[in-house]
Amino acid sequence: MDRISELPKEILQRILYFLSQEDVVRTSLLSKSWRYIWCSRPNLVFSDKNVYFQGKKQEFLSVVDETLQRYCDRRLRLEDFHLCMSDRDSLSLLDKWIAELATMGVKDFCLHILRENSCRVIVDLPVVLEAESLKVLWLHYCDLGRNIPENITFVRLQLLHLKNALIVQEIFDKIISSCTLITTLWLKDCKGLKTIKLEKNLHKYLKHFTFVNNAIYRKDERNVEIDAPALEKVTIYGSKVRFHYRKLRNLNNLVERSRVLCIDAPNMECFDYTGLVVPYVSFAPTSGWSNIKLCITGHDVDGAPSWFHILSKFIHALRHSIICLKKFHCSPNNNNLHVLGQDDDVINVGNRHVVVDDLTLKIGRSSSFTYLLNGLFCICRPRYVTPHWFSQENWNKERKVKEARDFFCKIEKTIDSTGNHDIRQYLEGFTFEGFDEFLLDWQPLQVATLLESEFVEFRVRLQWSDQHCESSSKLLES
Amino acid sequence: MAAETGTPTTLTLKSNDDELFSVAESAAILSVTIRNMVEDGCAGGVIPLDNVDGKTLASVITYMNGISAIPADEEKKKSYRDKFLSDKDFETLADMVLAANYLNMSCLMDAVSAKIAQVMEKKSVGWVRRKFGIENDYTPEEEAAVKEEHKWTFEGVETDDDN
């Protein structure tokens, strides 16, 4: 017999686990020994995007219904049930299926309702709240109803993933206070949610928290309090989210800004953050990466020294991880930054300079580039500065080379003409580099011969002499 | 234990063709089978792994060392796994899936299984048979009957003519 057919049945089932329903059913035709292997795999993955079902909604529903019925009747083990469909007229079936899944003890349920013609389709699904056996719940484009059940007992729930879900605050509160085992909470554009409160005593296993709030509901202010001791990874995106953490309220009067984010998570390992405000963090990632994307708006730089002051504290807290800092100009006019570059220690609050692995600067038409760079050199030691331009994807090679040359000239000018004694004293040298697509590596380049080169990406490598600064460099070299 | 003494403990693993490998305990205990042996106090001497040959074990140890050097970042671990498996042929993958199953290493087991499954994705029955060398022992009548039963699964697949 051939090698794959010889594998033990439990391994074949594991392999089949990763296939869609049509792919797995088709294996029955491979040979006689494959005839029934697919029948009892512990997961079902259906999608009506399959070409065969175009215009055959009814047939799709019967295939799902019959398959599920077969698992029910034969008491087969079913752990995961993933369903992706665009049909909203089959709600009664969905209600029936979910009730069946709940009795079968399904642990992983994923429902993705596709949008038809870009209008919002929201499926009313209060029945899902009764599925006590769930460990994993994914809902996309669903409505969890208005009737607030007396009890929600997601006692086994470990992962909650809600996207474009409509959920009233009371239901969310009940879910979140019932799931003490939760490790991953992923929320994107959830309407109805005003407050998310994660508590130390209740959510002691929470490792990953993602909160994304896109443009659609920007008007709503959200309130997030995170106090989760085991948090390892946080991803936050949303420009008008208001976060706070009670303990820190009086720590520093600068917290009294309109938008504040404070996070306390002693076990934080990786930290991913995109936002308009520089957060206050009371944790120190000890390994891993910190990916920080900050947008600078006119509002944020009203008091530029204090803004840099907060940023300095922030990256100092992250200093034991490998920091990648990306900064984007949102406002065309950042002249407020001109006040910088006079007294480093005011900005740096006496902290040692933090090594930043990669500093990516989004270059707009801003005149404040030099000032921004000077300010950043006061608080951190970037190993690399990488330029990124708006709409660079559409540029031809000549344009890209021209912009790269401009960028290199600006860097040179900033370094040569700086009044910042830090740069004069500690910057030992810098090299312009381009990414060679054939060698798949960065190579030093000459600005004069840029046009003849094949480079498509550019950066500046900086060598600093003050290696006494607290840094993650050891981590990088190991 | 490594954490107590401050010096990393090394284990010696023996393949079924009598090759010996040293590996850091912290990496080796990714295998639940090995971890259980260590916890039962069998780590002092040589740990025999009767179901894994030397070539496969060498590869598994490369994986153990590689993945345990990555801090807890699931995305980076995933990209390491993808890269690790990218140049492996099916024979090697079959050896590895058996080894991962025997060693009880769920992350490697899942990664290799998914990689094998990927080969079958959206591919016709004929293509999969040829790829894995599976002999079709159905009579034409039997085959037609099975096909009729599941006719919804045959749309949108790459045809038998593809190689």
Image: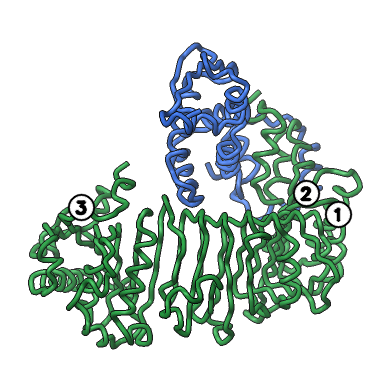
* Tag 2–tag 3 contact (CB < 8 Å): no
Specify the chain shown as blue. B
The tag earlier along the polypeptide, 3 or 1, is 1
- Single out the residue that lies furthest toward the front: A250
Do the residues bearing badges 1 and 2 touch, measured as CB atoms within 8 Å?
no
Give how far apart the Cα atoms at labels 1 and 2 are: 12 Å
Q: Is residue A430 above or below residue B35?
A: below
Residue A363 as seen in the image, left or right of residue B114:
left
Q: Position of residue A194 (x, y in %)?
A: 64, 79
Q: Is residue B153 left or right of residue A283?
A: right
Find disc 2 in the rendering and name its residue: B150
Q: Secondary structure at mark 3?
A: loop
Position above or below: A114 against A258: above
Q: Are the residues under badges 1 and 2 in a single subunit? A: no
Mark 1 residue type? Glu
From this viewpoint, is residue B60 visible? no
> Secondary structure under badge 2?
loop
Nearer to us in this view, A24 or B38: B38
Which residue occupies 91% across, 47% down? A73
Q: Is residue A147 left or right of residue B54?
A: right
- Find residue A406 and report its horizontal and vertical position in percent: 16, 74
Residue located 88% across and 52% down the image: A69
Q: How far apart are the two marked residues, 3 and 1, measured between alpha carbons?
A: 67 Å
Residue A379's label in the rendered image is none
Q: Left or right: A243 with respect to A330?
A: right
Residue where numbered disc 1 is placed: A66
Q: Give, as a three-letter code, the residue at label 3.
A: Gln
Query: In the rendered view, would you say A10 is above or below A264?
Result: above
Marks 2 and 3 sit apart, C-alpha to C-alpha, by 67 Å
- Residue picked out by circle 3: A467
